[in-house]
Image (tube, helix red, strand yellow):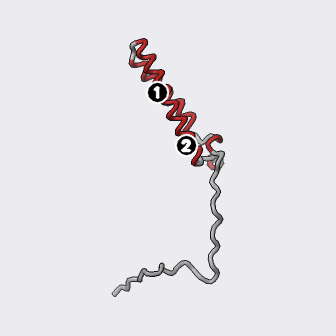
Amino acid sequence: MLSIFKTIPTHMDYKGQKLAEQIFQGIILVSAVIGFVYGLIIEQFGWTVYIVLAGFAVSCVLTLPPWPMYRKNPLSWQPPIPEISGETSQKPPEGIKKKKHK
């Protein structure tokens, strides 16, 4: 059962995060303007709040899950540096002295 959840992608790349943020802010801004104008016309502040909350819900559905459109530009990582044979990374860096306990 848990293996099903491990197959679901949970990441976004940096450009996808930027796109999601722009979509989120755009939807919130448009819904706020529409809600304000509609609430002003009918003179009911409650409808303004409802429209903004609906815009918030729509923007959450569109931007919170890592949809494939947010994963189009994956990072290319550098290959790992192979360790030098015979030496281990147990040595302290130069200039750092070990403290001797008495």
Residue drawn at point x = 62 percent, y = 83 percent: 86
Q: Which residue is mark 1?
A: 53
Return the x and y of residue 82 as percentages of the image width and height.
64, 73
Say whether residue 75 is left or right of residue 33: right
Residue drawn at point x = 50 percent, y = 34 percent: 25
Residue in front for this viewpoint, 82 or 64: 82
Residue in front for this viewpoint, 60 or 8: 60
Local secondary structure at mark 1: helix
Quadrant (top left, top right, bottom left, bottom right) of the C terminus? bottom left
CB within 8 Å, label 1 to label 2: no
Q: Which residue is mark 2?
A: 18
Q: Residues within 10 Å of mark 1 (few under 14, many from 20)?
A: some
Is 22 situated above or below 71? above
Q: Amino acid at mark 1?
A: Leu
Q: Amino acid at mark 2?
A: Lys
Local secondary structure at mark 2: helix
Q: Quadrant of residue 19?
A: top right
Residue that lies at the very extreme toward the top in this rendered image: 42
Residue drawn at point x = 59 percent, y = 44 percent: 16
